[in-house]
Image (cartoon, rainbow, N blue to C red):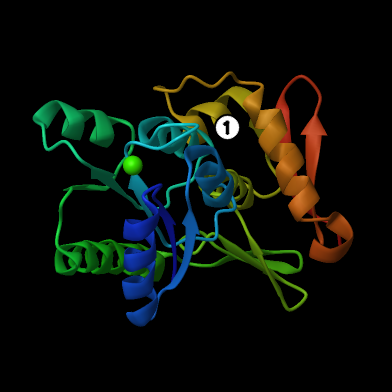
Amino acid sequence: MRLLLVEDEKNLAGALSGILKKEGYDTDVSFDGSSGLDNALSGIYDVIILDRMLPSMNGIDVLKEIRRAGLSTPVILLTAIDGVGERITGLDAGADDYLAKPFSTGELLARIRSLLRRKTKEMREGTEISAGGIRFDPGLLLVFCCGKEIRLTFKEGRLLELLLLNKGDCIPKDRIFDKVWGFNTDSEISIVEIYIHHLRKKLPAADCGIVIETIRGIGYRLTETG
Ligand code: CA
């Protein structure tokens, strides 16, 4: 399990990462908001522990960007202020849990375990879908192809799942948008093209035996190539 800790107080960050590593978690530390966001967007973390007050970009904005990018990584928000308003802001921005400073490390570890249990349960519920030369696990967001594992972001995963479940059929672009991005989104429908582009890059037809075709003016169709 891999954790990301985003905390600018060097002493606290050092102490916490020491404890987390001792508990067996691979732990990376970022000391400011924008490098924390860069790390988080790699999509490799199982839980992110994010301080609310950070230099360069505050924790709430980092969290919003993580969610905007379609990442569902569980996030625990750390804050110095234990107010209801703070808590609501954090949860609205997409935090899964919330811890007011000062907190006991025992409590932090319990919250991490709880989020990991939830994640593991969701992962087990995933059922693989195959096409061409790939197998896709929607719970793990992993594509297995040519003995390799290709990791997708949450939205890429939902998009691929939709294409696979409708293999051979053209899916209208607006339907893809509604299904994957939902109705409460700030994104424009053109985001579908961007994500199709990401998927094509991550899943080259030559290796994967599937191709995502553009049906001009209508939408997209996933077909097997051989
Ligand atoms: Ca801070």
- Dividing the picture into quadrants, the one containing residue 59 is top left
- Say whether residue 143 is visible: yes
Q: Looking at this view, is 199 or 27 the one in front? A: 27
In the rendered image, the residue lying farthest to the front is: 11
Q: Is residue 22 above or below residue 97?
A: below
Please state which amino acid type lies under the numbered disc 1.
Answer: Ile
Where is residue 159 drawn, in percent x and y?
Answer: 59, 43
Where is residue 214 drawn, in percent x and y?
Answer: 80, 33
- Say whether residue 221 is visible: no
Q: Is residue 192 left or right of residue 132?
A: left
- Dividing the picture into quadrants, the one containing residue 64 is top left
Report the residue at 52% width, 42% height from top.
Answer: 37
Q: Is residue 82 left or right of residue 145?
A: left
User: Which residue corresponds to mark 1?
Assistant: 176
Task: Give the quadrant of ligand 1.
Answer: top left
Indicate if the residue with disc 1 has its beta carbon within 8 Å of ligand 1: no
Where is residue 54 drawn, in percent x and y?
Answer: 40, 37
Report the residue at 61% width, 20% height from top.
Answer: 189
Q: Is residue 210 above or below residue 38?
A: below
- Dividing the picture into quadrants, the one containing residue 113 is bottom left
